[in-house]
Image (tube, rainbow, N blue to C red):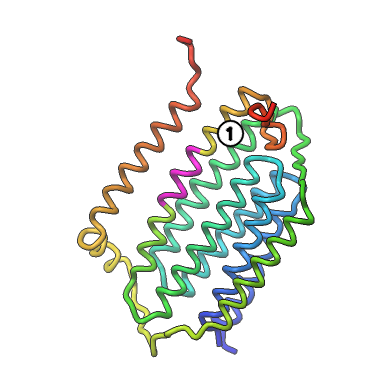
Amino acid sequence: MNVSDMIFLVVACVVVGSAAGVVLSRSLIYSGFSLLFTFFGVAILYVLLGADFLAATQVLIYVGGILVLLLFGVMLTHRLYNLNLKTETFQLLPGMLISFAVFVSLALVATQTRWHLAENKVVAPTTNQIGTAFMTDYLLPFEIASILLLVALIGAAMLVRRRTDA
Amino acid sequence: MITLQHYLLVSAALFSLGILGVLTRKNAVNVLMGIELILNSANLNLVAFSRYSSKGIDGQMFAIFVIVVAAAEVAVALAIVLTMYRLLKTVNLDQADVLKR
């Protein structure tokens, strides 16, 4: 067992454990900070998979953007003097049964299928390839994604605007 | 030796934990966190297949688009949650039953 395998095992345990913390923790703030560890762990898994650009994107957008936005959501939907940021669960037993069934079926598919794997694939830095692909094969999805982001931001701003004229 | 299957198992665990969060949490922001877990597990699958298959980097391109859509989704979803809090004074999903009454 070499070093990268041990790193994978440790990071996989951190990812799954903190994801369980997100789902099972009683406090919303603890859930948010567990999510931080999950996102960082997934970024490290991307590095182990040779996806350097995607790991940086993961840290920038998920940790820097989405997680901060979610914590804003937690703060803005609770009164600040009400420090009791508890969250409740319902239908815990059926939910656990369903998610366990999903996990078992996915794990069976993952282990029983005979995947067509590449022999000795060379892992190279991907930023150059990704930039080229964005400007050639993926030009139309790239433009559509930028329009989607613009529309989503305008829609979000319109949704939370206070209607004074109504 | 770490193979594709190990990554798929981690991703399956993330996915089922996300499903558990979506199904059982009452708080709408917490449900959003579960959805983020699900999207991350899908991304992990895409990148793992991109690494171990003989194709190029198409899996990573898909993962980037998934991240873009996740950013748009969480912005709109939080706007909806804030509007719901302003209208109903709660973000608990079991109390948002105006249409049922």
Q: Is residue B75 magenta?
A: yes
* Residue occupying the point 44% across, 29% down: A157
**Residue B33 or residue A9, whichever sits in front:** B33
Q: Quadrant of residue B13?
A: bottom right
Q: Quadrant of residue A151?
A: top left
- Image quarter in which the N terminus of chain B is found: bottom right
Q: Main secondary structure of the magenta part?
A: helix
The amino acid at mark 1 is: Val
According to the image, label 1 marks what residue?
B81
Count the labels in the image: 1
- Image quarter in which the C terminus of chain B is found: top right
Q: Is residue A10 left or right of residue A68?
A: right
* Residue occupying the point 61% across, 81% down: A6
Residue A13: image x %, image y %? 66, 70
Q: Which residues are magenta?
A: B68-76
Helix, strand or loop at label 1? It is helix
Depicted A40 relative to depicted A25: above or below: below
* Residue occupying the point 70% across, 66% down: A100
